[in-house]
Image (tube, grey):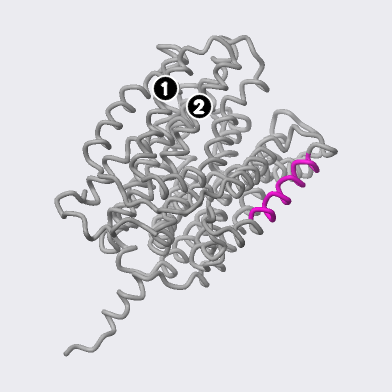
């Protein structure tokens, strides 16, 4: 049961698509920015806090694990208590967590503060896209989601650059203090611009189901994130067992409870499940570029961190440019067609990029970047970036339009989990595939010189092409995604005979 439908609210109380994106962009920007801004400052933190790199990694892992595992629960809270209210609560948690991070006297305090910060990020991430969907229609939702992707890509691109500048000139604490003015302004904008959404009234909250799903996600992300540092027996088997048992227990619980966290009917809906898994495969296929390419440039081609950052910025820039165009197209073309085309372009871009990396020349001077040798690799990045943006905007528009209104927050959270889980799982997978390939392509164990570079290049190429298969899997399942209610209505109007 829900409150009176959205249509009964006064027209002047309804924010337009651009207003809603502008208001929610502060939260989207902050949660994405802090996922990327910290990485470049880890070395500085190890020196300042007197810890080792193996310990400081938990500053990143704690944020990722908590944010991802709590997103569905926060999406459910948004459906139950109001998406705007939960989004604003997330901004408060994030601001306070950022303040604690900046003044952390020890690693333990910093990790605890990052967990607090991640709670806020999960609230904003889970309900940001849901708010955009709630206050848009099928006629303008594609453009709104496209603009939302611009904000996300901009944060990911700006994070490493801004983090490096702030850390170098103002200390690592400044990367957290920068969140305070942005967060405060964002909170006030959301409070002034976005009215509260309808709330889903349930007879009883499914606490057991929530804990089971939280346990499943937490152990899954934790297991994948630390796969390289846990023993095969008994730790890995124990985590795997908890993950499997909690998942099936959750499914059993949701089938029998009157007010489930996620109804099994929603999970079984072909439109939603296909959208989630195709997104998972698309983001996994991207990881050889976002994760391994920096290592290739710096280890094999002796690139500086600044030069590497300048090369990698091509990907988010392309997404920022293509996002609005992709949204415009998604309002006029069925998602099945657009997602298949987007994934195919991404696949071609990955194949081309894998071939082109061999042309990159070694950086002989810290001041001279061999740009001419980077023309083809950057062209590959641009191509696959275009394809991913063309796919992801259409896929996001499709799944949110297909989502039941009373579970919009939960489905929004699942779309974000597809991205973060895809990156986490593929990072472990890519590391394993590359290590196995490198053992074959560098049998002498060379650590420098032509044999090292040649073996590194071949192993990297094989890794790219191996993961590119996932884009093909995404294409195959996208063919069977069906049509959203808005697409059915649009096609009926277009095919109706003129009277």
Q: Name the residue carrying label 1.
A: 96
Identify the mark at residue 481; answer none if there is no mark.
Answer: none
**Quadrant where the C terminus is found in the figure:** bottom left
At mark 1, the secondary structure is: helix
Crowding at dot 1, Cα within 10 Å, few <14 / some 14-19 / many 20+, comes out as some
Residue 400: image location, x then y, percent? 40, 58
Identify the mark at residue 116; answer none if there is no mark.
Answer: 2
Q: CA distance from mark 2 to mark 1?
A: 8 Å
Q: Residue at x 79, y 33 (%)?
A: 445
Residue 461: image location, x then y, percent? 63, 48
Horizontal side of 388 relative to 3 (left or right) equals right
Horizontal side of 187 relative to 174 (left or right) equals left
Determine if the magenta segment contains residue 244: yes
Residues at marks 2 and 1 touching, judged by CB atoms closer than 8 Å? yes
The reply to whether residue 432 is in sight is yes
Q: Is 485 situated above or below 82? A: below
At mark 2, the secondary structure is: helix
Q: Which residues are magenta?
A: 236-250
Residue 255: image location, x then y, percent? 61, 62
Q: Earlier in the sequence, mark 2 or mark 1?
A: 1
| Residue nearest the viewer, comparing 65 with 267 | 267
Q: Is 491 situated above or below 292? A: below
Q: Quadrant of residue 2?
A: bottom left
């Amino acid at each position: 049961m829900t409150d009176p439908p959205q249509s009964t609210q006064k027209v002047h109380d309804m924010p337009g698509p651009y207003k809603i994106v502008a208001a929610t962009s502060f939260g989207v920007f902050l949660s994405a920015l802090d996922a990327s801004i910290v990485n470049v400052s880890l070395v500085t933190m190890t020196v300042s806090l007197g810890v080792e790199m193996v310990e400081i990694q938990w500053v990143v892992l704690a944020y990722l694990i908590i944010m991802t595992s709590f997103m569905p629960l926060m999406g459910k809270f948004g459906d139950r208590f109001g998406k705007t209210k939960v989004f604003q609560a997330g901004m408060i948690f994030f601001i306070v967590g950022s303040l604690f991070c900046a003044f952390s006297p020890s690693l333990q305090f910093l990790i605890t503060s990052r967990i607090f910060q991640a709670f806020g990020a999960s609230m904003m991430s889970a309900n940001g896209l849901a708010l955009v969907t709630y206050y848009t229609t099928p006629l303008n939702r594609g453009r709104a989601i496209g603009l939302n992707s611009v904000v996300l890509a901009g944060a990911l691109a700006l994070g490493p650059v801004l983090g490096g500048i702030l850390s170098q000139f103002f200390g690592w604490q400044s990367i957290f203090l920068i969140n305070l003015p942005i967060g405060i302004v964002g909170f006030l904008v959301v409070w002034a611009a976005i009215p509260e959404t309808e709330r889903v009234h349930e007879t009883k909250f499914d606490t057991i189901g929530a804990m089971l799903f939280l346990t499943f996600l937490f152990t899954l992300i934790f297991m994948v994130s630390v796969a390289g540092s846990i023993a095969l027996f008994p730790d890995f088997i124990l985590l795997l067992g908890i993950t499997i048992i909690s998942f099936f227990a959750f499914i059993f619980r949701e089938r029998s409870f009157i007010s489930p966290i996620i109804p099994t009917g929603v999970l079984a809906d072909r439109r939603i499940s296909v959208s989630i898994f195709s997104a998972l495969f698309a983001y996994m296929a991207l990881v050889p570029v976002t994760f391994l390419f920096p290592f290739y440039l710096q280890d094999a081609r002796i690139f500086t961190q600044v030069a590497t950052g300048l090369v990698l910025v091509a990907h988010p820039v392309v997404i920022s440019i293509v996002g609005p165009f992709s949204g415009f197209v998604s309002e006029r073309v069925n998602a099945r067609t657009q997602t298949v085309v987007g994934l195919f372009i991404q696949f071609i871009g990955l194949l081309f990029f894998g071939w082109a990396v061999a042309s990159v020349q070694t950086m002989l001077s810290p001041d001279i970047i061999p740009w001419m040798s980077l023309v083809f690799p950057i062209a590959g990045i641009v191509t696959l970036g275009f394809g991913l943006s063309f796919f992801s905007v259409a896929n996001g528009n499709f799944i949110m339009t297909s989502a039941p209104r009373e579970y919009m927050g939960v489905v929004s959270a699942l779309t974000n989990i597809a991205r973060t889980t895809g990156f986490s799982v593929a990072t472990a997978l890519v590391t394993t595939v590359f290590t196995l390939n490198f053992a074959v392509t560098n049998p002498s164990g060379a650590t420098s010189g032509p044999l090292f570079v040649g073996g590194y290049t071949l192993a990297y190429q094989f890794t790219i092409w191996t993961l590119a298969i996932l884009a093909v899997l995404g294409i195959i399942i996208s063919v069977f995604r069906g049509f959203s209610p808005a697409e059915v209505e649009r096609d009926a109007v277009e095919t109706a005979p003129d009277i």
